[in-house]
Amino acid sequence: MSTTAPAAPEGGAVVFDLDGTLVDTAPGMATALNALLADAGRPPLALAAVRRFIGDGITRLVERAFEATGAPAAPAQAAAIGADLSAVLEATPPGRDALYAGVADGVAGLRAAGWRLGVCTNKPQAAAVRALAATRLDPFIDVLIGGGSLAQRKPDPAPLLAAIDRLGATPGTAIYVGDSEVDAATAAAAGVPLILVTYGYLRGPADAVSASLKIDRFSDLGPAVARLAAA
């Protein structure tokens, strides 16, 4: 399917989730997480398990990792290990080769067509900044709302609504692109149409997730955006 992006309407904005939508960060995250689990005397997690645990922020990722490998972590322990994991991820961002197929051209095409672009992620802000720079997406992204930017995190709608507002758009002129149940809940709470990419970090079947449109490849994003913009 063509990757050509439709011309943006007035106030048109597209906001993306990051991990599992634009970038496959799970392999690097699994490596860093398993090293910290080993330090805590825990067994490693398979990559598939780490993929399922991503989406609700670093501290929740650590909590799920501990629950899957033994006794739950105490709140202070989860927060401390989460801070260590954030530092590792900031220091070792994913490279350009971690982008999903079609992302580089698709994002550039939307920007060239006049769309304002943002990222709304629960990934810690500093790590998200480094990831966008390392994957060379940062020139195309006008606004980044990462974990810790606000008191709230997805699925609370506040981060997505803040990104849309800073892009000079409204929920009626914006589109959210995400890969998970968290993203679906966020979009619904914000009253923003969602394009769900099915290749990311879903915890269950895509059929069980409510979305305006669903695509299996990022290269299908242009036509999906065109359908929603026309509607």
Image: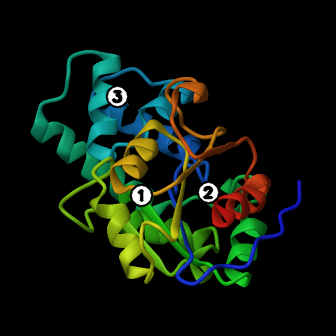
Q: Which residue, given by chain and number where applicable, does mark 1 sit on?
A: 121
Q: Is residue 112 toward the left or the right of residue 182 in the image? A: right
Q: Would you call the spot at circle 2 few (<14 residues within 10 Å), some (14-19), or many (20 or more)?
A: many
Q: Which residue, given by chain and number where applicable, does mark 2 sit on?
A: 22
**Residue 71 vertical placement versus 10 (above, below):** above
Q: Quadrant of residue 95?
A: bottom right
Callout 3 amino acid: Ala
Disc nearer the start of the sequence (2/1): 2
Q: Are marks 2 and 3 in contact (CB under 8 Å)?
A: no
Callout 2 amino acid: Leu
Q: Would you call the spot at circle 1 few (<14 residues within 10 Å), some (14-19), or many (20 or more)?
A: many
Callout 1 amino acid: Thr
Give the residue at x 62% y 73%: 137
Q: Is residue 128 toward the left or the right of residue 227 in the image? A: left
CA gap, disc 1 and disc 3: 20 Å
Q: Which residue, given by chain and number where applicable, does mark 3 sit on?
A: 65
Secondary structure of the residue carrying tag 3 is helix
Secondary structure of the residue carrying tag 1 is strand
